Image (cartoon, helix red, strand yellow):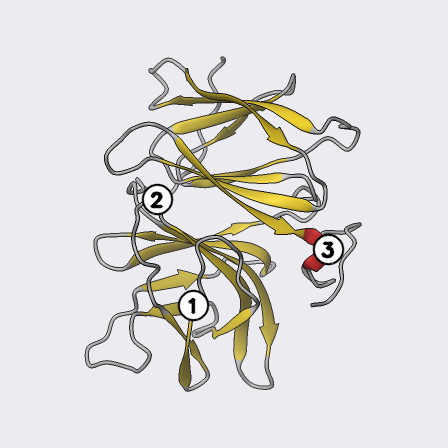
Amino acid sequence: MKAFPRRPVIPHLPRLATMAAILTVGMAAELPLVSFRAVYFDPRETVTPQLFVAHGKARRPLELDKSRLSDRQQASVRNGGLVDFFNAGEPQKDEVPAATLTLPGGALENLLLVLVPAAKGYRAWAIPLPPAEFQPGSTLLINVAPVLVTVKQGAAVALAVEPGSARVLALAANFKESMLPIQIFVKRDDAAAWKIAQSTRWAVDRRFRSYVFFYQTPKSEQLMLHGITERMDHLSESEAPAGTPAQRP
């Protein structure tokens, strides 16, 4: 395979857990809020952590599950664009948030929040989800492994996903088959040779769109995949991409 141009990436990511949340921003009467849905992913067999978010002058537990997206939740936004996540339900002396997300400039809708465990707490960043691309049948590829990954669907051009970044693998509108042939390649740096990690087939179902995490376990350098599906006809009109049937919960 040919080499792909390098893109700016987030610094090295540990082979640990990530938490993701679909974000849309709303406003209360005098309180800026971020509205989101969340899911927890951890390649280790660990208990799902209990985190809290500020909501006005109080804190609320963050709803997390390892196998599904949560219902919609809300958190306060401070200083014009910061969202804090805490380990405790009440303020503690000399407390430092477990993570603080800086919301990106521009449109604050259709974002994916990713939290990755760091030396202390978590590191957080937000990934835009382009509604025009992330349609039913498409897959968001999220690379939290320290290797470059490319994904090739059928005869299409391979899609490169840098460490610490995400790309949408769009399904062609005229694709009629029930299974999509997929090849996944990895390499550690530009000087290394490409190695095939998987040659497989993914089921095609336009009622859903998917989130696929690429990661490595702490004990292995083998590329692993973890997928979560989102049923599109369960989204509200504000959350669904243009042209997608949606109904309010």
Task: Tell us which disc is closer to us: 1 or 2.
Answer: 2
- Circle 3 SS class: helix
Q: Which mark is residue 186?
A: none
Cα separation between marks 3 and 2: 29 Å
- Residue 52 location (% of width, % of height): 38, 72
Disc 3 residue type (three-letter) = Asp
Crowding at dot 2, Cα within 10 Å, few <14 / some 14-19 / many 20+, comes out as some
Q: Disc 3 vs disc 1: which is toward the camera?
A: 3
x, y (%) of residue 134?
65, 44
Vertical relation: 93 (above or below) 170: below
Left of 223 or right of it: where is 219? Answer: left
Task: Report how far apart the C-alphas of labels 1 and 2 lie in the structure.
Answer: 28 Å
Q: Nearer the viewer, residue 153 or 104?
A: 153
Q: Which mark is residue 233?
A: 3
* Pointer 2 residue: 43
**Disc 1 residue crowd, few under 14, some 14–19, many 20+, Cα 10 Å:** some
Q: Is residue 156 left or right of residue 175?
A: left
Residue shown at the point (80%, 50%) measured from the top left: 243
The answer to whether 214 is drawn above or below residue 83 in the figure is above
Amino acid type, residue under disc 2 in the picture: Pro
Identify the element where label 1 is drawn.
strand
Few, some or many residues within 10 Å of mark 3 (<14, 14–19, 20+): some
Specify the label residue 82 is tagged with.
Answer: 1
Vertical arrangement, residue 149 with respect to residue 54, above or below: above
The residue under the point 37% across, 19% down is 190
Lower position in the chain sequence, tag 3 or tag 2: 2
Q: Earlier in the sequence, mark 1 or mark 2?
A: 2
Residue drawn at x 69%, y 59% is: 234
Q: Position of residue 183 (x, y in %)?
A: 53, 21
Q: CA distance from mark 3 to mark 1?
A: 31 Å
Lower sequence index among marks 3 and 1: 1
Which quadrant: the C terminus?
Answer: bottom right
